[in-house]
Image (cartoon, rainbow, N blue to C red):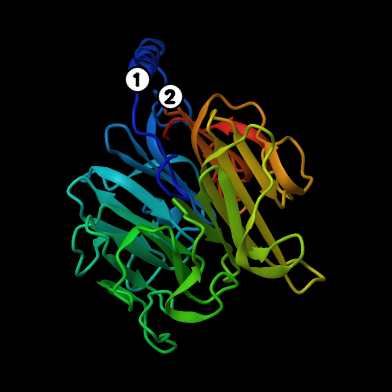
Amino acid sequence: MTAESRRASIPFVDSLVQNRYWFAAFLALVLGCDATSPGSGPPLVFAQLDAGASATCGVTVDGAGYCWGDAWTSGGGGTSKPVIAPRRIAQDHQWLMIEVGRALACGLTVAHETLCWATGFPFDSAPKRVKGDPGFVTISVGDNHACGLTATGGAWCWGDNFRGELGLAYPDYLTAPRDSAVQPAGGQSYVALRAGPESTCGLVANGDLFCWGGSEVEGDGFTPHLVQAGFGFTTLSFGGNIAGRGRACAIAADSLSCFGYEVHSALAQPIPTTVTLPAGAAPSQATVGGIFEPLVGLPYVYALHECGVSTTGAAFCWGTNDYGQLGDSTTVDRATPSMVAGLPVVAAVTAGGVHTCALTRDGTAYCWGWNGRGQLGIGSSQDHVTTPMEVVSPR
């Protein structure tokens, strides 16, 4: 089983990847391609990928960071023009991982320094070091807050605490988001940590699950509290939408359990419930995502989808599918996992707002679903696509 994550990552890149990269570079040189045009340069070979609300970011095998979609994620400042192809960010840094939420993005450098950028205070469009950063081995970004995990299992969080997502025993209704890392109450040592929509969850060594913050996942608990004991969870994934309706999934042995907001019944499931998987599709990694969207004539509608990768490298998604985010060539909602169409062997998958991306074992990125902000990285901002499309080369 892979490490817990909403993000997608792969641990290795074989010689095929390197040959693919240099062969494409050779063709670009010989044919005189314009390096500023999407798809004209050598293809990117990714080691990590993360889909946010309406943007996507990733790190290549050589540590370069790229983002696309909402312009603020790639240094676009206040511009509203979508970034429709990967754009290099912070070229003076080498990255291990980059995560993106709704209005906050953070990256972990090879020096284990954490930098964040955002749409507004306390971070801006230029990456800024998180104050009090003790040196994390992994980070996770929710909507407007983020958390990091140290090598010794220490949890630290920063950003918005309006719903208690930092775990400080109280919400900050009148206090601006924090640019310094603070430790949640309780003093637990965690083996996995995930930030979601206005919420955070962590796994301890015995497989028990603790959550804090405010959403259907943890019931407005401002300090870490035990959600479920005895499941023996080993991996954790957490997502949801930008209105605070969240959902978490965790893997125990060869079963996948999810809890929180249930999209098909519009009810909360406070206890982890086993997801029925197709025959032979033992889970190796799972991810959840979603978005909150107003519709004309209706008060609100919630969209939520979940995805996972089987041990054989097949990607499955289920939930709402109004923009084709399940990748099965339809816009039909699915209550049970449906295989994503036309993908090579998948290493990991990441579900964003109403779009999804996958990372194949050769480092190629594919995305599908809603593309109104260019978050698919396919070189256009066509409304949506219902099957995977390869992310193009940088502009």
Position of 257 relative to 308 (above/below): below
* Nearer the observer, 255 or 324: 255
**Which mark is drawn over residue 14?**
1
Position of 120 relative to 20 (above/below): below
Residue 303: image x %, image y %?
68, 59
Q: What residue is shown at x 26% (from left), y 64% (from top)?
A: 154
Q: What residue is shown at x 33% (from left), y 46% (from top)?
A: 97
Left or right? Give the position of 353 relative to 363. Answer: right
Q: How far is disc 1 from disc 2 in space, using C-alphas? A: 7 Å
Q: What residue is shown at x 23% (from left), y 42% (from top)?
A: 94
Q: Are marks 1 and 2 in contact (CB under 8 Å)?
A: yes
The residue singled out by tag 2 in the image is: 362
Residue furthest toward the bottom? 174
Residue 379, image quadrant: top right
Residue 368: image x %, image y %?
61, 40
Judge the density around disc 2: few (<14), some (14-19), many (≥20) Cα neighbours within 10 Å: many
* Nearer the observer, 156 or 295: 156
Residue 156, image quadrant: bottom left
Position of 240 relative to 159 (above/below): above
User: Which quadrant, please, contains the N terminus?
Assistant: top left
